[in-house]
Image (cartoon, coloured by chain):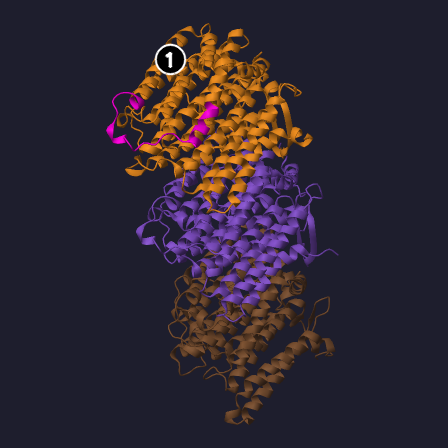
Amino acid sequence: MQFPILSVIVFLPIVVGALLLFLPPKNRKLIYGVALAVGLTAFLLSLVVYFSFDANGPRYQFEEQYAWLPQLGVSYHVAVDGITAPLVLLTGVVIFTGVIISQRIDERPREFFAFLFILASGVFGVFVALDMFALFFFYEIAVFPMYLLIALWGWKQTREYAAMKLTLYLFIGSVIALVGGLAMYFASGLGTFDMVALEAANFSPEFQRLWFPFVFFGFAVLGGIFPFHNWSPDGHVAAPTAVSMFHAGVLMKLGAFAALRVGIMLLPEGARFHLPWIILLTLVNVVYGAFIAMVQTDFKYMIGFSSVSHMGLVSMGFATLNYNGFVGAGVQMFSHGVMTALFFAVVGMVYDQAHTREIPKLGGLVKYMPFVAVAFIIGGLASMGMPGLSGFIAEFPIFMGLWGGGYAWIAIVAAISIAVTAAYILRAVGRVFFGEVPAELEGHMHDITRSEKLALGLFCLIMISVGIFPTLIVPVVQSGVNVILSLVGGA
Amino acid sequence: MFGTISTEMLLAVLPEIALLALVAIVFVADLLLPEKRRSALAWITAAGLLVILALTALYARPAAEAEQLWGGMLRHDWLAFVFKLLFLATAFLTTLFTINWPTVWRKGEFYVLLLTSTLGMTLMAASADLIMLFLAIETTSIPLYIMAGFMTEDDKSTESGFKYLLFGAVTTAVMLYGFSLLYGFAGTSNIYEMAAAISAGAVPGPVLVGTILLILMGFGFKVALVPLHFWAPDVYEGAPTPVTAFLSTASKAAGFAVLARVMIAAFPSILPDWQTIIAIAAALSMTVGNAVALTQKNIKRLLAYSSIAHAGYALLGVAAASELGVLSVVYYFLAYAATNLAAFGVVIIVWHKIGSDEIADYSGLSRRSPMLALALLIAFLSLAGVPPLGGFIAKVLVFAAVVQAGLVWLAVLGVLNSIVGLYYYLIVLKVVYLYEPKSAGAIPVARPHAAALLASILMILLLGTVLAPWYGWALSSAASLF
Amino acid sequence: MAFVNAHLLSLILFSPLLGALIVLLLPGKNKNLIRRVALVLSIVPFVFTLIAWLGFGNAPVIDGFRYQQQAVWYPAINSSYHLGVDGLSLSMVLLTTLLTPLAILASFSIEDKIKPYMALFLALETGMLGVFLSLDLLLFFVFWEIGLVPMYFLIDQWGSPTGERELWKGMKVSARRYASFKFIVYTMAGSLGLLLAIQMLGVVSGTFDLIALFQSWPSISGTLFGLSAATVKTAAFWAFAIAFAIKIPVWPFHTWLPDAHTEAPTAGSMILAGVLLKLGAYGFLRLVLPLYPEQSHQYAGTLAFLATAAIIFGAFAAFAQRDFKRLVAYSSVNHMGFVVLGIAAAAFAAGSEHANIALNGAVLQMFNHGISAAAMFFLVGVIYERTHTRDLEEWGGLFPLVPVFGGLLIFSSMASLGLPGLGSFVSEFLVVRGAWPVFTVYTALSMLGLLFTGAYVLKGISKTLHGPLNEKWKGHLSEINRREILVLAPLLLFMLWIGFWPAWLLSVINQAVVTLFG
């Protein structure tokens, strides 16, 4: 009986999180130590899963299945495939670095880490779930801790408003998708929620065309698809740093992934019918998001909108319904996750010391935090799609997918976003890290701790390695994409 | 004249007999116990209820085939069984919560009333005959009227008692009129025989619809469905909070047990007609309940409106009128009872310390008592329908039932209402977690309260994660109706 | 040794990057250590290049390229790590690996943040070499873009300390920030079109391998994306052409160059003018002409017109400058114009003898200009370091104060001018000879530019060295030192060598020209 590594990854955070609530509240060192141990364990386990994944092996690996509610056909069925293995790794990386970045939280740290771990468990659960009921179950678990995390530890100016908006938006999306999921359960006549079985369900084309928007948009809300992206910038900005990292780095991928897994893969006819117009929405995401990022003066808002723009590329990749598009989207979920986690970590580090996020009020920070500056530059180059970094490896096939899918003009328009991204990134780099140090900041700034450097270094290492050696991730993603194509019937 | 009384018949009414016995014991104890020992009354009641619960679970299980017993008055089936267990458990937890409540807890009469009401509920769940049903309903309700107004010194309590009595009496009378019409046309008061008569056309169409409406007035009042809900907020707010807890959980559950049984057993042949009425009632309850809850400043009133909304959700299961529908109703009440008890439990505990039920006074509860705040968090999230809590499973099941029945618009309305619900639950949680407390100092929690609260929270978690056993019970209950 | 031979190109390509990493690991305090280690490490690729050069004639030829290497890189989209050289690329590689150590030696006078400076320089070398060595279109693009980043930082951080320009809406930034920003934004904007065209090529052809593309792409016809293949190819042609035209730079896409060259640190300008501009011309020769022969022929006239404009306006603009460095910058526009003229002639008359001559001239001009521009920028840097001004009016009659410097300046200027006996004469002659039968009018007009080349060069020299001595420099000007002479010596040697005996280089170049455009 093989070691149930996936179940450990899924449940370890929430179990330890619950236990954390019983630790003495003042002993910050102990609390942080326990949290760090959990984060590190989750990260190491996810590494094991990722690097043991055999790209030429069976479709699902590390499979576990236990009966949960047999009368309804609900089982606890988990496994990883080519698309989810990198996402599990991503979650591991982000939870580990997120805990490190949260080492300075001194306001009720027990509760903070407990809720963060509930969130992590929910996310892991969604990625590995092969049963639709289990997927919804974990999906909702991942939504509600956001409210408390943002409302209690977030940016005082907007945290209550942002937390409520985010939670309601995401909840609406998930329950709408739930209704769609229930409809699929009943229409299939198979009496099971198991998604592997449902792939063979053969829903009628009319059924699929009717229900695909419910399911797709219900989940894609979390992916930040236009016009339901509105919760994201405020949510990102109001959240405390580790939560922003999680939110943009992992949670938004959750939405895109669930839209793929439940929407596109189970209702392929509906996907083929609707995605040609949905791709226009993703284009709006990509271009509009970039332009809005350009006019921001708040550093965190700029990055928040940049996330909206880059997530648009993921949905765009899906919407091309061809091989290159899917491969690119799969890599982009991973690459963007790492990149945006880095960005928010950097913003958090800057804000912690400068107590402002207004770009005009910052400057010359390379003098005090050179490591942070270099890390941000690397992240920035990746976000511009600079070759040699993972962003290029991800974006290039997405564009090829557009060309191949008959969306040539969309490729040309979307390329504008690359130029705009370069502009705002370079501007931010120049203004925040180089130039004159403003008088208010002189002497108040110091460098980051060693463990924080470790976190940033990990992000950079990943982006550079994948950029130089795409074979580190692409074969794994390919194995997942082949399955998707067999269901959707694309080229 | 009576025929032989078999052991099955006795076992079928084991809870009722035992409850009667317990009533007697409490009465006697009340007479005998000296003033300062009167606190034992609550413990006697609680212990007794626990024993009855165990006995019922072990010995009063129905056979695979449901049968009508006691001259067709009662139907011994899984639906009745599960609900009886629910009532007993709820009564037990409520008794624990009454400890230390002023005016109430040292009074033998109160516990006698509580037990009598529980007895009425167990009979309600099992009633197969309209007359039996009416008796059971009255047996349940009249003690509840008194319990609501028990705090005679308190104006709000007396007002709530009176209001409850007056409206209850009126709606019961209307319901009785409906019963009599049915009896007149169908020629029998047994629900199941009536079903046959109705499908044979014994009752003319318009009359049938009219009687359904009349009957629904009675049931609807009992479970506080829109448009018969207006008593609930005032009564809930004024009554002693343990009574409110009991009202919102056990009494509502009893009403639903009856509703499910009567509508599905007696009127299956005219399903489309009453399905629409129920669907509309459900839609209205969900919407009105949630909408008005948004403006509440008093936590008991908020929970009252929330209960109205939840009655709406549960009614979705009845509207589906399928096995899955009834199953979902049963599961819903299991989860909802645990949840509401936990929520009211926290309200009770907090009230003991700060003497107020205003939401604003709950500010910073998380700092004064993190555990209580956590319990409230779990309870409210379960009300909102968030996993891994029982409320989530319950909601999924009722939505599944209506989707399966093809009433997708109801499901969509239901999910949208869930969002509204989530909003006001989060507002309360925000007050509890985010704001600064108005006064400092930990909140003491009496042991029996802690035990009851813990039990409720545990049930919420179990109902949300380990699904199989409860689901199996609900499944058997549903099957027994079809 | 067998390992070296089998992986020669990878060694050339990555030894600078490895060098950069080694430099980063050195302790930051010891400036001299860093400088010397960087210099030594930068000679390593040059050594490998010599090995390749010497063995070039005997190396087996496969599809026109030698020393090929291929490895898996991004198989999912049919792009591989494919390297190879022919005469064209090897000569450019030689130029690069020669100039980099000299530029590093020239940078010994930099005092501030030496470690990142040297590391960026070496990383930049890898970027440039990658462009020349790639035989995979995607890999080409990767290195094309990668090369931009180190140069951006080199200009931004170590460029001219003085000067201010307005960026937008009254926001003032330092001149070097302005120059670096303009450089990178201009070039990246241009490569956006290139990116899209490459994506499109990859999708249509199913591969990015250049050798396969040379076979398959020109023969694609029919409809693509709902338009005729010819229309699509024309659009792609212009996308490629504009991206490269910005780099060369071809008039009117040249406006980034004066600022970038002027504000860059001395060594940065040497590399910018010496190598980076050649990337654009190389792109034309390696990609545009072979992939789009019809479109190249069709638009060769436009290209020739723009080339002529560059020659003439570059010369006029150079003449008008007061800033010596800016003068040299515009001279680059002027000299690269000849390269483009040669390319245009070759495009128009592909396959003919004239085309071959013009092309040989163009490539040789690339090499020569690299050498002479590097020398000129360095000399300007030498005097700037001593006088802290680049204004021609500020000097005057310096010859007696710094005779050696003066002599070297005159020599290099003559090379830049195209004096017979020195390298540029040969290349300019070949270009004119080849272009004359093809584009007579344009070539004739370019002579005007050539005339003014003499004018501005002489202006530069005379204002600096001749005339009455500007008293304020008396006693404040030191002679050119040994290190600086060491930087210049190889450059001058090449100028002479190519001027007298160009065959060693031309034969290698010609092999490529004949194979590619036969």
Residue A74 point in image, percent of width and height: 66, 55
Residue A239 shows up from this direction: yes
Q: Which residues are magenta?
A: C463-491
Q: Is residue B75 left or right of residue A263?
A: right
Q: Which chain is purple?
A: A
Badge 1: residue crowd in 10 Å (few <14, some 14–19, many ≥20): many
From the image, tell me which residue sits under label 1: C450
Q: Is residue B379 magenta?
A: no
Q: Chain of mark 1?
A: C
Q: Residue at x 56, y 31 (%)?
A: C45
Q: Is residue A430 above or below residue B82?
A: above
Q: Which quadrant does the C terminus of chain A fall into?
A: top right
Task: Tell me what hue chain C is rendered in.
Answer: orange
Q: Is residue A286 above or below residue B301?
A: above
Task: Tell me what hue chain B is rendered in.
Answer: brown
The picture quadrant where one finds residue C476 is top left
Q: Is residue A374 above or below residue A114?
A: above
Q: Nearer the viewer, residue C6 or C177?
A: C6
Residue C385 point in image, percent of width and height: 35, 33
Residue B386 shows up from this direction: no
What amino acid type should be assigned to the residue bearing mark 1? Leu
